[in-house]
Amino acid sequence: MGLLVDGKWHDKWYDTESSGGRFIRQSSQFRNWVTPDGSAGPSGEGGFKAEPNRYHLYVSLACPWANRTLIMRKLKGLEEMISISVVNPLMAENGWTFEPDEGVIPDPIAQADYLYEVYTHVDPTYSGRVTVPVLYDLKQDKIVNNESSDIMRMLNSAFDDIGAKEGDYYPEELRQEIDEINDKVYNTVNNGVYKAGFATKQEVYQEEVTKLFETLDELEERLQDRRFLLGEQLTEADLRLFTTLIRFDSVYYGHFKCNIRRITDYKHLWRYTRELYNWPGVSDTINFKHIKEHYYRSHNTINPTGIVPVGPKLDFRLD
Ligand SMILES: N[C@@H](CCC(=O)N[C@@H](CS)C(=O)NCC(=O)O)C(=O)O
């Protein structure tokens, strides 16, 4: 675990000392957009036209943020058009690596051993954390974007004229409601589990875990009479919530101490999780071995022995 400072790798755990025991996530730095005609998107610069075989996606199968982009790539049928690399689940002193192992797909660009080399390849003086997902432009040798919520949106629509599958997961008329849900789910659930899990002060942990379960209780109520968060239609808000829910009982409940209730204890949230897991293509993007190995083995301040628990046994079948 570490970060780049002026292009040099430093092995360093998150600093919670200076923030009163709180984990504060850094903002992503590459924020350009792939668009149908190469014009600039909502942020960053232009020059990234949607073309087949031009873009490459770096992911970890463990990571909930990367998982969102993989699901969108799958739902939009972009597997042939956008290639991927998969990092090793263990994130240790060199951060994410391409150390060969089951499910790892090496880096075709710089034949990198470490993901940070991909960052320094495009910016030799990069300073910041080296995160997945990363969307890479093979034509210009540039990182387009390393923010999962942006990448999801580009995959949702930028490739529509060149053969992406039908389906709009961020429809115009639902945007306001989707944005509101995303905001709450991001702060208290997606990032909430990390804020609870990485807290180094009791009161911070308690505060975060309380907020997390308040939102889960609200979502349970919301899903009482709705199939998905916005009703009958599957949207990006569901995909964003799902990648946290699917990891919850296996990792966040134990490893991050988010253990007031399990997802399986919630009637509607559990039905919803199973329904999304069984949505065509989604389960292909889920790898519990990578998920469990990553968290339990990489965070040695939380789990010093690195022992990976055997359970829980989950049954995702729909009744
Ligand atoms: N805001 C980013 C967050 C991505 C992120 O934090 N990914 C984690 C893996 S789950 C990572 O690569 N962490 C490495 C680090 O923080 O050094 C996004 O949504 O794309």
Image (tube, grey):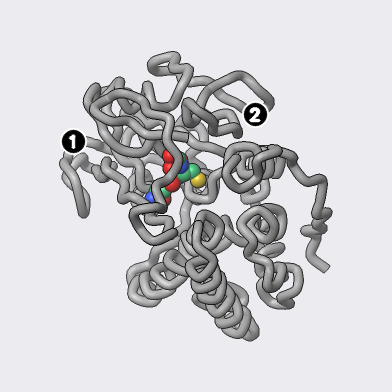
| Residue that appears at 71% across and 59% down | 249
The residue located at (33%, 47%) in the rendering is: 158
Q: Quadrant of the C terminus?
A: bottom right
Mark pair 2, 1: CA separation: 33 Å
The residue type indicated by label 2 comes to Gly
Quickly name the residue at label 2.
103
- Residue type beneath disc 1: Gly
Q: Is residue 289 left or right of residue 117?
A: right
Please tell me in which quarter of the rendered image ligand 1 is found: top left
Relative to 170, residue 222 above or below = below
Q: Position of residue 104 (x, y in %)?
A: 60, 26
In the rendered image, the residue lying farthest to the top is 111
**Residue 264 vs residue 34: left or right?**
right
Q: Is residue 238 visible?
A: no
Q: Nearer the viewer, mark 2 or mark 1?
A: 2
Residue to which mark 1 is pinned: 47
Mark 1, ligand 1, within 8 Å: the answer is no
The residue lying toward the viewer, choosing from 308 and 268, is: 308
Residue pictured at 67% horizontal, 56% vertical: 277
Left or right side of 32 for 309: right
Within the image, what quadrant is residue 51 found in? top left
